[in-house]
Image: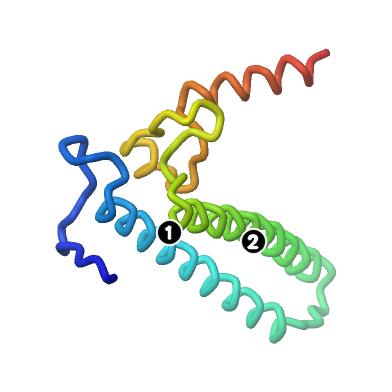
Amino acid sequence: MSIVLPQDYRPSDDEPYMNPRMREYFRRRLLRWREELLDEANETLHKLREGGSTEPDIADRASTETNRALELRTRDRARKLIAKIDEALERIEDGSYGYCEETQEPIGISRLEARPIATMTLEAQERHERMERTHRDE
């Protein structure tokens, strides 16, 4: 069953939460984001493969290595983000997307718009971070 979304569709609080249209909106948004990250990763891989430069100047060589290391760290973050996107897509499939993993309450459209991979309501996330800080400080 294919869901047709109007070009200008945006989820709103006036419609049933996580109805099929809303889930499809976030599914497409996550897939687009995932595709962008994969494109960037492939671009980086291509640059790194061709970039085996042997700079004669030691400062240039150091700069090149620093840039490569930064690029690899960025790609590692993207890889982790892709895993979170995949988890969010699985939640869309199993019907748990948009609900807090801690309280089972709706996460809220504005939070999901800002962070489509969110797994907790803002309140639960803040509580979780406070607990982590408390345990880290002990």
Q: Nearer the viewer, residue 90 or 60?
A: 90
Residue at the image point whose x is 40% and y is 66% from the top: 32
Residue 58 image position (x, y, % from top left): 84, 69
Q: Nearer the viewer, residue 1 or 22?
A: 1
| Figure check: 3 above or below 103 | below
Residue 89, label in figure: none
Residue at the image point whose x is 31% and y is 38% from the top: 109
Check disc 2 and report the residue beneath it: 79
Circle 1 packing at 10 Å, graded few (<14), some (14-19), many (20+), is many
Residue at the image point whose x is 44% and y is 37% from the top: 99
Residue 130 image position (x, y, % from top left): 63, 18
| Figure check: 88 above or below 112 | below
Residue 30, label in figure: 1
Q: Nearer the observer, disc 2 or disc 1?
A: 1
| Figure check: 134 above or below 58 | above
Label 2 amino acid? Arg
| Figure check: 132 above or below 109 | above
Mark sitting earlier along the chain (2/1): 1
On the rendered structure, is 82 left or right of 2? right
Residue 50 image position (x, y, % from top left): 69, 86
